[in-house]
Amino acid sequence: MPSPIIQLEGIRRIFPMGDETVEALKGIDLTIHEKEFVAIMGTSGSGKSTLMHIMGLLDSLSEGRYNLDGEDVSAISRDKRAEIRNQKIGFIFQSFNLLSRSSALENVELPMLYRRPAISGRREKALKALEMVGLENRSDHEPRQLSGGQQQRVAIARALVNEPPIILADEPTGNLDSRTGDDILGLLTSLNEQGITIIIVTHDPDIGGKAKRRIVLRDGNIEQDETN
Ligand SMILES: Nc1ncnc2c1ncn2[C@@H]1O[C@H](COP(=O)(O)OP(=O)(O)OP(=O)(O)O)[C@@H](O)[C@H]1O
Ligand SMILES: [Mg+2]
């Protein structure tokens, strides 16, 4: 039985908005096990990105407990959060978020530059990650010299390069045509088969249907959680 890799208990996230507050997450209880492939769905504003940011240690929680890969990360410092994030999580975003003046190779090397102690053999590792996404022959290209699908592959290589156990993707196919989106989904599926836990936020029911488990948020709560 795979062990839990993400355990959330009673997670609330409350944003101050002037004199008022917005409660984006209202008490989320959720356990995700190693090697799962999970789609997070729900209407706009239901809290998907907020949940992803908390799971990915990009944001802190207002209330509740979060255990990530056996470690309590509910109340750690910003620096510690960044360190664990860098080791445990690879991110993929809808808009790719690549550095526009840097080559594909340099973009993929980036997460390794933040590691202490520094990672040796960065170039080889970045090339290997580009190879995994089928872009070894585009390593010198800048993002504007690549198609949207290729840019997203660079972003996936960047997410993979530190060999994180978890990949979080927020609408990774949202800016791609459906065929290119299918290719990207196929790539994520094969990474999942190699043992990486994949959590993907999507509006697309086709993608949701291909995930082994679907979690539907509504107004900051889990409305539905079903496994194929
Ligand atoms: N930094 C913030 N400050 C204040 N309110 C916020 C902040 N971030 C999110 N919210 C609010 O929290 C709620 C959930 O937002 P979130 O971005 O998680 O939704 P989402 O499900 O990702 O939506 P979408 O599908 O449109 O991306 C929304 O009502 C939003 O306005
Ligand atoms: Mg969102």
Image (tube, rainbow, N blue to C red):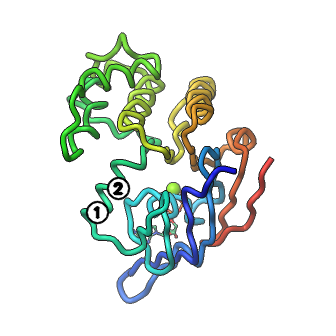
Q: Is residue 40 above or below residue 172?
A: below
CA gap, disc 1 to disc 2?
6 Å
Name the residue nearer the viewer: 94 or 169: 169
Q: What amino acid is labelled 1 in the image?
A: Lys
Residue 52: image location, x then y, percent: 50, 58
- Quarter of the image holding residue 164? top left
Return the x and y of residue 128 as percentages of the image width and height: 37, 21
Outermost residue, right side: 228
Residue at figure coordinates x 72%, y 50% from the top left: 213
Question: Measured from the top left, where is residue 9 in percent x and y?
Answer: 57, 74
Circle 1 residues within 10 Å: few <14, some 14–19, many ≥20: few
The answer to whether 115 appears left or right of 36 in the picture is: left
Q: Is residue 176 above or below residue 115?
A: above
The numbered mark at residue 52 is none
Q: Residue at x 72, y 38 (%)?
A: 210
The residue type indicated by label 2 comes to Ile
Q: Does residue 177 show up?
A: no
In the image shown, does 146 or 79 lie closer to the viewer? 79
Q: Nearer the viewer, residue 124 or 52?
A: 124
Q: Secondary structure at mark 2?
A: helix
Residue at the far front: name it. 1
Query: Which mark identifies residue 84?
Result: 2
Residue 71, above or below 74: above
Quadrant in which residue 222 is drawn: bottom right
Residue 37 image offset from top left, x and y in percent: 64, 44
Question: Is the residue marked by circle 2 packed among few (<14), some (14-19), or many (20+) residues within 10 Å?
Answer: some
Q: Are marks 1 and 2 in contact (CB under 8 Å)?
A: yes
Q: Look at the numbered disc 1 and give the secondary structure of its residue.
A: helix
Name the mark on residue 80.
1
